[in-house]
């Protein structure tokens, strides 16, 4: 069978591939500690599950409008006003089957063959492939540990061309956990203001997972003059521990773009699950207090993980400001293992395989995120599993 040519452009999600390999090893009876997937270990809050159960009992099991129920769209509008001091209308909002689906629809609606999309690296693994599927060209710009893994105005100026159609910005970041400050966002906006053809895609999925009392800020808050070409992606997966419910949403003042995304969705998935929409309505309409215990645990796990990692030979790990990942530089560890004959290639993939195959701990190589000589582990798991996993990493490298 001859597959479509586009299949040669993309690969399986590396994070899902690592999780799948680890899952198979677990089924084979091996005690694998999986620190790969970005999925909170907490249950979905009870009031959200109750809302879903009530929706089932009420018979809300039919099709909804393709872009989401009007009630959920209004809840999204209210959320942006309450949490971000941003004003949208329901025709400027689209509900989709997860944040990933939201970004996919956006790129399909926005990007034409030949268009370039700037993606600071390290990046979430799916950004470049989704750009390729839309016919665009991902322009990945490396941001080093010395730069706190953040994109700078100078790098933006160098990356911009007449073909640039969009810049993707993710804060708090997956995989680094870094957060852009108001001043950093303002500096990027000062460059973008001179390029009116460029959209800014702001992926805010980790908005509520911020450490040390920090307040989240979106580039739309510091540069309202760019609001007409800022597209915000968010969802309920991470903050409310609703990964499997698959509800994400998009907001943009360009209602024409939202309508185009709605049309694409109507010809692909149609509406997101009606019951999941009822659950998301309860999540967005309720108090944020249900997030606090999760945030407290993530904060404690972050401090524990970073402290432990920096005591391991050949590893350097910067503290994060948000999300639930530790992204550590490991070129020293790779070199040590290579010289000892433990690995045959001086790559983070070789190190990742070594840790999984020999010490039964799964992380994701940094090269999957566009920056080699790094490993990402998730601390969206219990402190007991995190401790065991770090014990194994320490044993492997020390």
Image: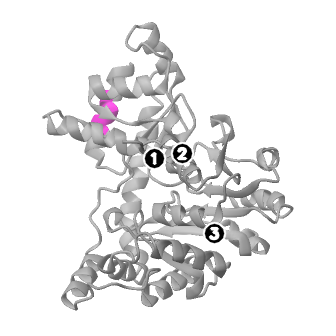
For the C terminus, the quadrant is top left
Above or below, 55 against 213 in this view is below
Residue drawn 46% across and 73% down?
267
Inspect the magenta stretch and tell me whether residue 391 lies in it: yes
Residue drawn 24% across and 41% down?
23
Mark with earlier residue (1, 3): 3
Residue drawn 70% across and 51% down?
114
Q: Which residue is mark 3?
A: 231
The total number of labels drawn is 3
Element type at mark 3 = strand
Q: Which residue is mark 2?
A: 176
Furthest-left residue in this view: 29
Mark with earlier residue (2, 1): 2
Quadrant of the image occupied by residue 218 = bottom right
Above or below, 307 against 110 in this view is above
Element type at mark 1 = strand
């Amino acid at each position: 069978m001859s597959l479509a040519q586009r299949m040669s452009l993309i690969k399986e999600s590396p994070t899902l591939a690592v999780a799948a390999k680890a899952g198979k090893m677990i089924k084979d009876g091996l005690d694998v500690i999986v620190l790969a997937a970005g999925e909170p270990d907490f249950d979905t809050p009870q009031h959200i599950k109750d809302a879903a159960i009530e929706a089932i009992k009420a018979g809300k099991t039919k099709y909804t409008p393709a872009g989401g129920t009007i009630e959920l769209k209004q809840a999204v509008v209210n959320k942006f006003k309450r949490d971000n001091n941003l004003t949208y209308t329901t025709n400027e909002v689209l509900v989709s089957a997860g944040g990933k689906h939201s970004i996919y629809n956006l790129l399909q609606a926005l990007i034409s063959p030949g268009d370039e999309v700037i993606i600071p690296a390290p990046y979430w693994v799916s950004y470049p492939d989704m750009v390729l599927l839309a016919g665009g060209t991902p322009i990945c710009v490396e941001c080093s540990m010395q730069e706190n893994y953040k994109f700078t105005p100078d790098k933006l100026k160098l990356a911009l061309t007449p073909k640039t159609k969009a810049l993707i910005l993710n804060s708090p970041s997956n995989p680094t956990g870094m957060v852009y400050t108001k001043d950093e966002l303002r500096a990027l906006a000062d460059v973008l203001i001179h390029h009116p053809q460029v959209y800014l895609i702001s992926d805010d999925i980790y908005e509520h997972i911020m450490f040390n009392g920090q307040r989240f800020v979106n580039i739309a808050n510091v540069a309202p003059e760019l609001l007409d070409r800022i597209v915000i992606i968010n969802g309920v997966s991470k903050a409310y521990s609703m990964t499997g419910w698959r509800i994400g949403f998009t907001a943009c003042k360009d209602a024409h773009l939202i309508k185009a995304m709605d049309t694409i969705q109507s010809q692909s998935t149609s509406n997101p699950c009606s019951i999941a929409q009822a659950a998301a309505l309860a999540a967005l309409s309720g108090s944020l207090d249900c997030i606090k215990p999760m945030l407290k645990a993530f904060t404690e796990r972050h401090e524990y993980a970073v402290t432990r990692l920096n005591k391991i030979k050949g590893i350097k790990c910067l503290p994060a400001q948000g999300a639930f990942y530790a992204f550590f530089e490991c070129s020293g560890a790779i070199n040590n293992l290579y010289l000892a004959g433990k690995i045959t290639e001086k790559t983070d993939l070789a190190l990742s395989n070594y840790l999984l195959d020999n010490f039964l701990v799964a992380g994701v190589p940094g090269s999957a995120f566009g920056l080699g000589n790094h490993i990402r582990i998730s601390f969206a798991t219990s402190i007991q599993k995190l401790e065991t996993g770090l014990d194994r990493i320490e044993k492997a490298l020390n």
